[in-house]
Amino acid sequence: MRHLLDTQTLAREEALRILDVAEDMADTQRREVKKLPTLRGKTVVNLFFEDSTRTRISFEAAAKRLSADVINFSAKGSSVSKGESLQDTAQTLQAMGADAVVIRHGASGAPRTLATSGWITAGVVNAGDGTHEHPTQALLDAFTIRKRTFGDDSRGRDLDGLRVTIVGDILHSRVARSNVWLLASLGAQVTLVAPPTLVPHDVSAWPARVVYDLDEAIAEGCDALMMLRIQLERMHAAYFPTEREYSRRWGLDATRLAALGTGSMVMHPGPMNRGLEISADAADSPRSTVLEQVSNGVSVRMAVLYLLLAGMDEKENVQ
Ligand code: NCD
C-alpha cells in the first residue's frame, strides 16, 4: 500500500488485510511493554490544518508505539497562517525526511493532491478532508463492529449480512461517506437516516438506502446504530428548525435506546454533542462502543502506518 486516501477505491482484500493486521497490533497492545521496534528510524509527520483531538493523538500514539519519530505540525501558529502554500509546506517536510504524512485538511481532495503532486515521496494518509472522506475512522468502525460481533473469531471475516444504520448529519460527514463505501465493500447492508435537508444530493449513487424516520429504522432493527455529530461549524444555513426539534426527531434518547434490540451496538465517532444527537444514557450504556472505537483506532492506525512504511510482505515483523 502506497497511500491511504479513501475507502471508495480501497479494495476489499486490502481493507481486510488492514483489519487483520490491526488484530495483531491489538494483541501487542495488551502486553505490558506496548512499544514495537518495527518503524525505528522512520519519520511520521502529522500535518493538521483542521482542529482535531482524538485523531491526531491516535496517529501519534500509533506511530510512537511502532517506534517511529513523530513530528506534529499544526497549521495554527505555522507559516501556513502566513500564507504558505500546501506545496511549500509539503516540500519543507520532504526536505526534513518525512516517510509518511498524515494530513487533515478542510479542502476535500487535499490528501490526493499531496499524494499525486510529485512534491513529496512520502506515503500519504488521509486523516479527514473536508466533507469527503476519513478512511481510518471507517476502518476503526468496521474493526469495532467485527470485534463486537465475532470476538476472538474476527480474523479473516467480513461483515456479510450485518445491518448498519447511520444517523444524522450525513451531508457534512466524511465519516458517513467513508463508512458507506467500506461497509458495503465488506458486505454490510447500510441504511442512512436523516432529515431530508441533511441527505446529500448524490446519495442515489451510494450503496445505501435512505429512510427519514428514526423510529421506523429502530423498529426494523440493526446490528450497529452509528450516531453522527451535527457539524454546526460546516452549516452556513438552517438545516433544521431548532436543536430541540432535531434532538426530538433524530436524537438517540433513553426511550429509543430501550426500543433498540438488545443485540444492537451504539456507535459515535466523537466528539459527541451530548443531549443533541445522543443522550448521556445512550453514550454511557454498556451497548455504546465509543471508548472501544478510540482504543481500536490506535491499533488500526498502527496497522495502516505499518503497511505503508514497512511493506506488505513483512507481516512476520509484528510479533
Ligand atoms: C470526525 C471528523 O473529524 O470527521 N471526528 C473524528 O475524527 N474523531 C467526526 C466529527 O468531527 O464529527
Image: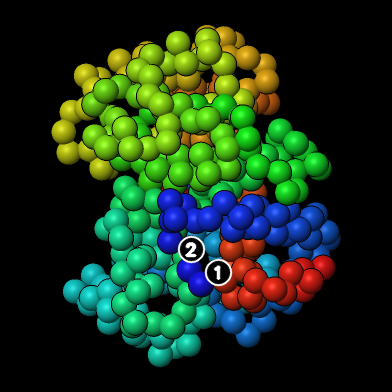
State the residue at coordinates (63%, 37%): 159
**Which residue reaches farthest bottom?**
95
Q: Could you tell me residue 80's position as x and y percent? A: 26, 73
Do we see residue 176 in this rendering?
yes
Q: Could you tell me residue 279's position as x and y percent? A: 49, 22
State the residue at coordinates (35%, 18%): 212
Position of residue 172 relative to residue 51, above or below, is: above
Do we see residue 134 in this rendering?
no
Neighbours of disc 1 within 10 Å: few (<14), some (14-19), many (20+): some
Q: Which mark is residue 17?
A: none
Q: Are marks 1 and 2 in contact (CB under 8 Å)?
A: yes
Quadrant that contains the C terminus:
bottom right
Q: CA distance from mark 1 to mark 2?
A: 7 Å
Apparent side of residue 112 relative to residue 22 in the rendered image (left or right): left
Find residue 70 and report its image quarter. bottom right
Position of residue 215 relative to residue 120, above or below, is: above
Q: Which mark is residue 4?
A: 2
Element at badge 1? loop
Q: Which mark is residue 1?
A: 1
